[in-house]
Amino acid sequence: MIANVAGDDVEPKPAKNEAFGDASGEGSGDVKPIVNVKPFKVQEPKLVPIGVVSEGHDTASFFTTNARWREREELLAWDRRQGVRVGFSVCKDKSVLKRSYLTMQCEKSGIYKPPKTRKKPNLEGIGSRKCNCPVRLKGFFDKDTNDWWLAMLCGMHNHDLDEKLSGHLIAGRLSAEEKKKVIDMTKSLTVPRNILTNLKQNKKESVTTIKQVYNVRTRWCKGERGNMNELQYLISKLVEHKYVYYTRCNSEETTLKDLFFAYPESIKLLNTFPTVLVMDSTYKTNNYRMSLFEIVGCTSTKMTYSVGFTFLHFELEDNFTWALTMVKGLLSSKDNKPKVIVTDRDGALMNVVGTVFPETYTMLCFFILGRM
């Protein structure tokens, strides 16, 4: 294809006719035929889509082997490891467990198909990793030897290969053993970043991201809750571990407004060391956007202990009054009251402390004041 003449009209010379002579009138006949020749147009070259290169990358040599596998999952795992070495992710195309073959392709094979919805999706400015890559692999099951073997149908890519597959969904997918490890470490209250570090230390070639660790944790939590939501599951656990808890609903008794809970051992410590209490709220702890109001006590040996926790729907005087009234109800005697209560500069909380505990001295936290 000639790029410099793209779109130009080329007038070819008329062809000679043996019976009537050429177009100039020379020949044996006197008749001058009219030759209608349509101009020939050179078509413009089609633009290459963004992210796709015209030169292909042949990866057939990486998948040409005479090896055999006992299980289809072993075959798929080997193909994915080879794909990571080359620079692309291998995914299953069309396969059923009952069938005796397994079709695999590049993750960029095929064309993006938007979900079927009544409302037409707006796809302007939205890209897709699908570029109709022709790579195809097929695994066959040999009934005579009861093992799997691999055939390379097409190994030519029409896109660039990545040096690192970090962030690819299929390449970073966790195995069954890794998922079990994530769940076990979650039960041990290990934070996700430490779980990810442990997975990468055990598997050097792992390209798993923190998002996939969060996904496994979320699916496990949903499975544990069943049909219950987060608050219902929390209350069931409070009952299971014999916590002391109180709830308050709205006027229609359809929505939980506040929730207070305390451990029985914490109640014993409160009645033993009620002199100093520290109160503060923590935010962004749940999907309901309810602030966690925490109450901490101090022992005679300058050690701290948790008195109780309250999920507050709003940080108003009515909510703080209810929470401190629940704390006051945990005290065994009227004379056993806190002498000092330390708070932040929350006006509603400071007013409520003087109302519920009128004989208690109120102080502001120096650490919180230093951050202001």
Image (cartoon, rainbow, N blue to C red):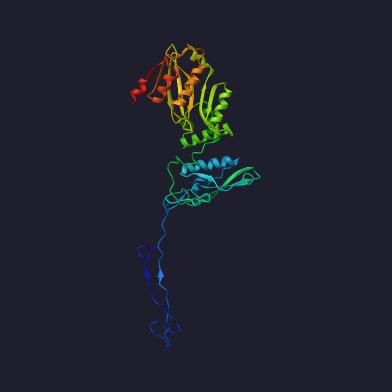
* Residue 181: percent from left, percent from top: 53, 30
Task: Tell me the quarter of the image containing the C terminus.
Answer: top left
Residue 60 shows in the view: yes
In the rendered structure, the answer to whether residue 361 lies left or right of residue 77 reads: left
Number of numbered discs visible in the structure rendering: 0
Say which of 91 and 223 sits in front: 223
In the rendered structure, the answer to whether residue 344 lies left or right of residue 256 reads: left
Say which of 363 and 308 sits in front: 363
Residue 269, placed above or below residue 169? above
Residue 37, placed above or below residue 100? below
* Residue 357: percent from left, percent from top: 44, 17
Residue 172, placed above or below residue 314? below
* Residue 32: percent from left, percent from top: 41, 85
Residue 208 shows in the view: no
Q: Which quadrant would residue 297 be assigned to in this image?
A: top left
Residue 219, placed above or below residue 333? below
Task: Tell me the quarter of the image containing the N terminus.
Answer: bottom left
Q: Which quadrant would residue 167 be assigned to in this image?
A: top left
Q: Which quadrant would residue 224 be assigned to in this image?
A: top right
* Residue 238: percent from left, percent from top: 56, 24
